[in-house]
Image: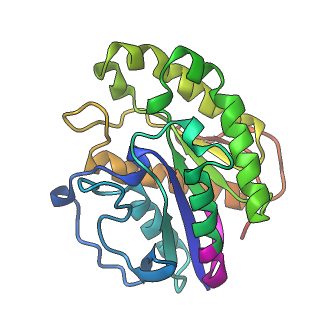
Amino acid sequence: MMHSFLLIGQSNMAGRGEMEAAPPITNEQLYVMRNARWQKMYRPVNPDRPFSGVNLAERFAELYCNAYPGEDVGLIPCADGGTSLAQWAPGSLLYDHAVMQAKFAMRTSRLCGVLWHQGESDCGEEASRVYAEKLTEMLDALRRDLGMPELPVMLGALGDYLTEYDEGTRVWYPKVNAALRQVAESMPHTAYVPAEGLTAKADHLHFNTASLMIFGERYYEAYSRIAMSGTDTATGTLEDGVTMRGIELL
C-alpha cells in the first residue's frame, strides 16, 4: 500500500524553491495527491500560488522511498502561503480541508506522518506568546480527528536568515522557534527539525532550493529517528539538534 504524508503550514512548506535549480523528478514511486487520486509526482507539488516552486517534501519522499524499497510514497499537499496559526485552528477552513484530504488519502494509502512548517506569520508579541499552546491544541485535534493518536509530526524551524527580513520578524522569530521546540519536547511522537545554516532566496523569507533539499533530509532524519525509537517516551536530542519523543511506527 502507498505510504503517505500530509503537508501543512505556510509558504515554506508549500515550497518556493527555484525550479530551475532542482534536478528532475525521475523516481517512478513518488506520487502527489490531486483530486483525491494519486498522480505521478510533478512540480509544483503544492500549487497554492502561481509562483509555487520546489518543496522540501520532495527530498523527504525520495529518502523515504530509498529506505523502503518497493514502497510507493505519496504527498498530500495542503499548505497555504501567508497563513497564520490561527487560520489552522480546529474547525477552520484550512484545518478541515487538510483533515478531509488526509481522510481521502487514507482510503488508498497508509498515512505515516505530518510535515509542518509555519510561523513566519506569527512573528509578533501576542502570536508568539500563545504559539505553543495553540499548536498543541491543533495537533491534538488533528490526531484525534484522524483517529491516529500516535501519528508522527515533524515541526520545522524558521530560518535564521529572517534576521534580514524585517525588524519585527527579527525580534520574534526566535520565540516561535522556541515554541516549536517546546511542543516537540512536550508531545509524544513529535520532532523539532532545526534550520541552522540554511539559506534563503533574495527575499530573505523563503528557503532556496539547495536549502530545501537539506531541510527535507533533516525532516527525514527526524522521522526515521521517531520510527526507530520504539515505545520509549524519554525526550532526547538527536543529531543536528533534532529533538523528539519516540513511538513504534514501522
> Residue 227 at x, y = what percent?
69, 61
- Rendering coords of residue 52 (x, y %): 28, 55
Location of residue 204 with respect to 42 vertically, above or below: above
Residue 116 percent coordinates (x, y): 54, 48
Image color mode: rainbow
Q: Is residue 27 above or below residue 45?
A: below
Quadrant containing the C terminus is bottom right
Task: Indicate left or right for 79 with 244 as reference.
Answer: left
Quadrant hosting residue 167? top left
Does any portion of residue 222 appear in the rendered image? no
Q: Is residue 217 left or right of residue 132?
A: left
Q: Quadrant of the N terminus?
A: bottom right
Report which quarter residue 101 is drawn in.
bottom right
Place of residue 53 in the rendered image (x, y in percent of width and height, measured from the top left): 27, 56
The residue stretch that appears in magenta: 104-113
Q: Nearer the viewer, residue 68 or 128?
A: 128
Residue 130 visible here: yes
Residue drawn at (48%, 49%), measured in percent from left and top? Answer: 218
**Per the image, is 105 magenta?**
yes
Q: Identify the residue at horizontal 19%, vertical 34% (top origin).
A: 202
Q: Residue at x 39, y 63 (%)?
A: 58
Work out which residue is located at the far left of the displayed protein and give it: 20
Question: How many numbered callouts?
Answer: 0
Along the line of sight, which residue is nearer the eye, 21 or 241?
A: 21
Residue at 22% x, 33% y: name it. Answer: 203
Q: Does residue 234 sit above or below 127 in this rendering?
A: below
On whether residue 90 falls in the magenta region, the answer is: no
Q: Is residue 174 left or right of residue 26?
A: right
